[in-house]
Image: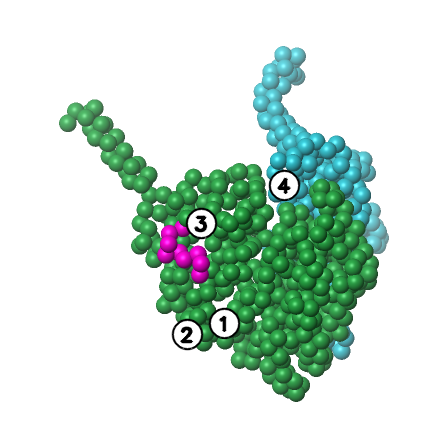
Chain colours: A cyan, B green
């Protein structure tokens, strides 16, 4: 029942927070854009100048760049698939009434509370290490040469570690969605002779659709910026086999101390994130309104 | 008492407190979380007893984080720190930018003439000592005497690379999980490239010729990389492309390496209480190829004062205390001679007590055989043994290190890695305006 004046008043009331949020976003973005067109290396003072698109050109021509883009997308998509598929399966499993359910759920969720570099370090040194790791010991026990996970399959190993961390998040969200499902409906369907698979396919899955969308959207935002796990385990290597866009920017910013190039990389990352976000919203965002 | 009088008295009391606070100068010291630095923080009572008017606040960081922090701070004129712990790579670069305060005017008891010439040379720019060395290190061969004996061999004090290969072949026993040699493979200018650059010096290679032209297309670099890859593929541990200093230290302490060529400071760790092979470690100079240069590096963690510091006198007093001969004696009296920060002073190595430390002689011989101002067989335009003291080096060498690490992992051949390294280095040097 808003009148014209009350709507104007409403807009005035929210405007301070909107303006603050806008500045919060625009100022850093503007500074990054500004630096991305500059030659600005911390260790070569006095040589700052405008260089047009040179910094962007360097990124686009770098042999590592397309590898990094591919790895970034691979990481996001790989982790999303693993966490959603296994998240649904685990959620279905721990939704069953079993003895010790509370403790079981806490155990399943706990990897999410381990800090990323710690998780990566544990996997690197206690499991995947070719001399001291548990997996290497298992391989030797079977008479096999230990597999060099982080050297031979760096990207797959990182996807696995990140999935291990994010699986609990997906499980948690999907489990809450499952719990809101009406058991009467499921029983009714069962009495009508619907098979277990059909109940899952036509009742559970549609019910989970919105929760899956939330999982995919939230995880994508975080996965695009995954850095700690790579920094701790492979350092983007061997070579550039596990270099992602954030890691490439890190190298320019903090090892080469080249602010100009790092800023250009940051802008490229913003563009990539927007493309992915728009694509995602088009594809599945409508589920949220439903 | 009337109320205004009471207020006045109160205000005076506050002022008195404030005056006392001003008399005490607080300096902020950024340092690296190495054992020797942590030990210094435990000995601060001695400093406070001698300098009651100075208070020291510590910012202790891991090596890479420290480097990022202090570099960003000094390059942007942040002025957070009064004393920074920096290495031999930073000093010549920062000195050229006039970012550091000269330490030539430290008190006479500092005895700058006592600093080892090789170390002082790397920390001096245009005749000004810009950083006071806290500890210095070179690299050397650490090997298992018991395994060498079992193989019926003896390690010469000054081995050649051929000796190293022979020893590695003899000690390797993969079924028992013993690998002849452990070397750095993890990419990074301070990781595999520190080792490989120092190694390349003994093969007659160099990063740049006199005109700053990259030299990775030269046969000396090919010989270096081929030898390294051959050695590591045949006698090194699996997964070596991920091994840096700490990983190799663990492997050596677990008894999984026959030899390890790395920093001299590791000697006190491999003979220390965490090592399962402490009793059977021998030391030798880093190998050579008879070309006049050995494959060892030179590094010194040093204390420097940024020009932006407003408390330079207090900072100098602290540096004088921390890097003075008296500090070495203080550590020796509390923790024993083996724990004294090594590699900075001539007098330490003429001390009869210190000579009893098993790795003392090999450390000083290694340091003395490195020359940062004349590091290579052929002439070069740069300073630095395992690095090139130009601002662009850290970025370039990290990228080159990735290529060599990929070659070690078998993702590319030595020739591909060298060709890419050559293109990459040439492009970067052009972009930076060297040629």
Q: Is residue A195 magenta?
A: no
- CA–CA distance between discs 3 and 4? 26 Å
Q: Are marks 3 and 4 on the same chain?
A: no
Q: Is residue B111 magenta?
A: yes
Q: Judging from the image, what secondary structure is the residue with disc 3 in?
A: loop
Q: Chain of mark 2?
A: B
Q: Chain of mark 1?
A: B
Q: Could you tell me residue A207's position as x and y percent?
A: 76, 44
Pointer 4 residue: A44
Q: Judging from the image, what secondary structure is the residue with disc 4 in?
A: loop
Q: Is residue B337 above or below residue B31?
A: below
- CA–CA distance between discs 4 and 1? 39 Å
Pointer 3 residue: B104
- The crowd level at tag 2 (other Cα within 10 Å; few <14, some 14-19, many 20+) is few
Q: Are marks 3 and 2 in contact (CB under 8 Å)?
A: no
Q: Could you tell me residue A248's position as x and y percent?
A: 71, 47
Quadrant of the drawing holding the C terminus of chain B: top right
């Amino acid at each position: 029942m808003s009148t014209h004046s009350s709507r104007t008043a409403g807009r005035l009331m929210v405007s301070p927070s909107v303006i603050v949020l806008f500045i919060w976003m625009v100022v850093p973005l503007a500074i990054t854009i500004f630096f991305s067109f500059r030659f600005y290396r911390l260790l070569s003072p006095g040589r700052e100048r405008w260089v047009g698109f040179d910094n962007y050109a360097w990124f686009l021509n770098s042999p590592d760049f397309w590898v990094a883009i591919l790895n970034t997308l691979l990481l996001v998509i790989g982790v999303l698939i693993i966490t959603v598929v296994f998240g649904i399966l685990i959620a279905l499993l721990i939704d069953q009434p079993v003895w010790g359910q509370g403790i079981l759920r806490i155990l399943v969720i706990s990897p999410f509370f381990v800090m990323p570099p710690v998780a990566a370090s544990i996997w690197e040194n206690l499991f995947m290490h070719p001399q001291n790791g548990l997996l290497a010991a298992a391989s030797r026990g079977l008479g096999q040469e230990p597999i060099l996970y982080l050297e031979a399959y760096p990207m797959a190993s990182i996807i696995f570690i990140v999935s291990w961390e994010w699986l609990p998040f997906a499980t948690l969200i999907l489990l809450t969605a499952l719990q809101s499902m009406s058991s009467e409906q499921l029983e009714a369907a069962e009495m009508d002779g619907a098979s277990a698979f059909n109940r899952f396919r036509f009742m559970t899955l549609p019910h989970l659709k919105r929760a899956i969308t939330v999982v995919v959207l939230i995880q994508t935002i975080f996965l695009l910026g995954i850095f700690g796990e790579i920094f701790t385990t492979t350092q983007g290597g061997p070579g550039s086999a596990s270099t992602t866009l954030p890691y490439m920017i890190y190298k320019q910013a903090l090892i080469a101390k080249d602010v100009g190039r790092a800023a250009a990389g940051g802008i490229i990352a913003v563009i990539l994130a927007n493309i992915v976000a728009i694509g995602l919203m088009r594809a599945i965002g409508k589920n949220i309104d439903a | 008492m009337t109320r205004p009088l009471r207020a006045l008295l109160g205000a005076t009391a506050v002022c008195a407190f404030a005056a006392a606070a001003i008399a005490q100068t607080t300096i902020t010291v950024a340092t690296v979380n190495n054992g020797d630095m942590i030990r210094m923080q435990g000995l601060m009572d001695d400093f406070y007893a001698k300098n009651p008017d100075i208070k020291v606040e510590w910012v202790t960081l891991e090596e890479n984080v420290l480097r990022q922090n202090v570099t960003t701070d000094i390059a942007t004129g942040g002025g957070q720190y009064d004393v920074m712990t920096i290495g031999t790579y930073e000093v010549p670069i920062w000195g050229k930018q006039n970012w550091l305060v000269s330490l030539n005017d430290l008190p006479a008891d500092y005895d700058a003439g006592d600093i080892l010439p090789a170390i002082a040379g790397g920390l001096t720019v245009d005749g000004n000592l810009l950083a006071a060395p806290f500890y210095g290190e070179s690299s050397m061969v650490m090997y298992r005497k018991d395994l060498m004996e079992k193989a019926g061999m003896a390690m010469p004090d000054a081995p050649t690379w051929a000796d190293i290969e022979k020893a590695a072949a003899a000690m390797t026993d993969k079924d028992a999980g013993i690998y002849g040699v452990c070397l750095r493979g993890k990419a990074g200018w301070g990781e595999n490239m520190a080792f490989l650059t120092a190694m390349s010096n003994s093969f007659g290679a160099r990063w740049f010729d006199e005109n700053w032209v990259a030299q990775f297309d030269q046969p000396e670099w090919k010989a270096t990389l081929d030898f390294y890859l051959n050695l590591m593929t045949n006698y090194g541990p699996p997964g070596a492309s991920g091994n840096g200093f700490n990983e190799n230290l663990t492997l050596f302490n677990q008894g999984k390496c026959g030899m390890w060529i790395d920093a001299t400071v590791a000697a006190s760790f491999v003979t220390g209480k965490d090592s399962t092979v402490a009793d059977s470690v021998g030391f030798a100079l880093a190998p050579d190829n008879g070309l006049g240069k050995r494959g060892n590096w030179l590094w010194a963690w040093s204390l420097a004062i940024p020009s932006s510091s407003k408390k330079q006198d207090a900072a100098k007093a602290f540096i004088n205390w921390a890097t003075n001969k008296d500090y070495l004696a203080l550590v020796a009296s509390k923790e024993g001679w083996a724990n004294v920060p090594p590699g900075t002073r001539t007098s330490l190595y003429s001390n009869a007590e210190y000579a009893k430390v098993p790795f003392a002689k090999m450390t000083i011989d290694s340091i003395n055989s490195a020359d940062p101002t004349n590091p290579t067989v052929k002439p070069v335009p740069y300073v630095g043994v395992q690095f090139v003291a130009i601002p662009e080096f850290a970025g370039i060498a990290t990228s080159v290190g990735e290529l060599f690490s990929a070659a070690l992992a078998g993702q590319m051949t030595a020739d591909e890695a060298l060709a890419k390294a050559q293109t990459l280095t040439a492009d970067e040097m052009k972009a930076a305006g060297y040629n």
